[in-house]
Image (spheres, grey):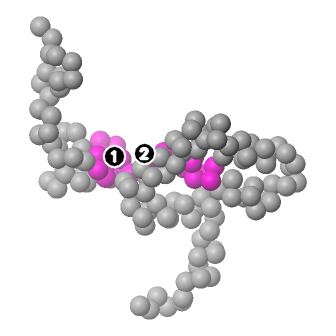
Amino acid sequence: GSPPLGSPPLGSPPLGSQPVGSPPGGGGESGESGESAAGGLLINGLDARFVCHLIDQPLRLMALLAQTRAGRWRRNGQSASKPAVLYRSPVFADAFAMPDLLLLQLGLVVLGPRRFLSAACRRFEAGPFWRRLLPRGGGG
């Protein structure tokens, strides 16, 4: 009757027949990038726009935590600082901070450093800061 547990479903290619990181259904010839059904770029089998959405909330939270640490929310009293302390506390870190860090790591691996840092700079609103640091003219 039915296939044993752990075996691929009937009609699917055997395990190991696709290279690691290739999208299901073949994808591009290199197995690393192609087009998704929605038209987005596939990177390691994941839609880049989807990964950008995944990392957006952890980046927002990291920006809020950085602002709280810098005292930008001091006017709100304990309503902003207490959740920031609880988020990093050992009791809640496994449930909240670690999954967020894993999503950020996934985003860095899938998107690459340039695209990930671009998203982080947008979320932290650090564009003007970096423009002041970079030399003008773009020479070597």
Name the residue rendered at 69%, 58% in the picture.
Answer: 66
Q: CA distance from mark 2 to mark 1?
A: 7 Å
| CA neighbours of label 1 inside 10 A, class few (<14), some (14 to 19), many (20+) | many
Q: Tell me if residue 5 comes above or below residue 79 in the rendering.
A: above
Name the residue rendered at 17%, 26% in the picture.
Answer: 8
Q: Tell me if residue 129 comes above or below residue 42 in the rendering.
A: below
Is residue 27 in view from this perspective? no
User: Label 1 sits on what residue type?
Assistant: Leu
Nearest to the observer: residue 21 or residue 119: 21
Name the residue rendered at 54%, 88% in the picture.
Answer: 135
Nearest to the observer: residue 42 or residue 10: 10
Say which element carries label 1. strand
Q: Residue 32: x, y in percent? A: 23, 54
Is residue 40 in view from this perspective? yes
Report the magenta residues as a range.
Answer: 36-62
Residue 53 is covered by the magenta coloring: yes
Q: Residue 14: x, y in percent? A: 11, 32
Q: Residue 88: x, y in percent? A: 66, 46
Name the residue rendered at 68%, 43% in the picture.
Answer: 89
Q: Which residue is mark 1?
A: 46
Q: Give the farthest residue toward the front.
A: 90
Q: Residue 2: x, y in percent? A: 15, 11
Residue 77 is covered by the magenta coloring: no
Q: Are marks 2 and 1 in contact (CB under 8 Å)?
A: yes
Q: Which mark is residue 50?
A: 2
Nearest to the observer: residue 82 or residue 134: 82
Looking at the image, residue 66 sits to the left or right of residue 109; the answer is: right
Looking at the image, residue 107 sits to the left or right of residue 129; the answer is: left
Which quarter of the figure is the C terminus placed in? bottom left
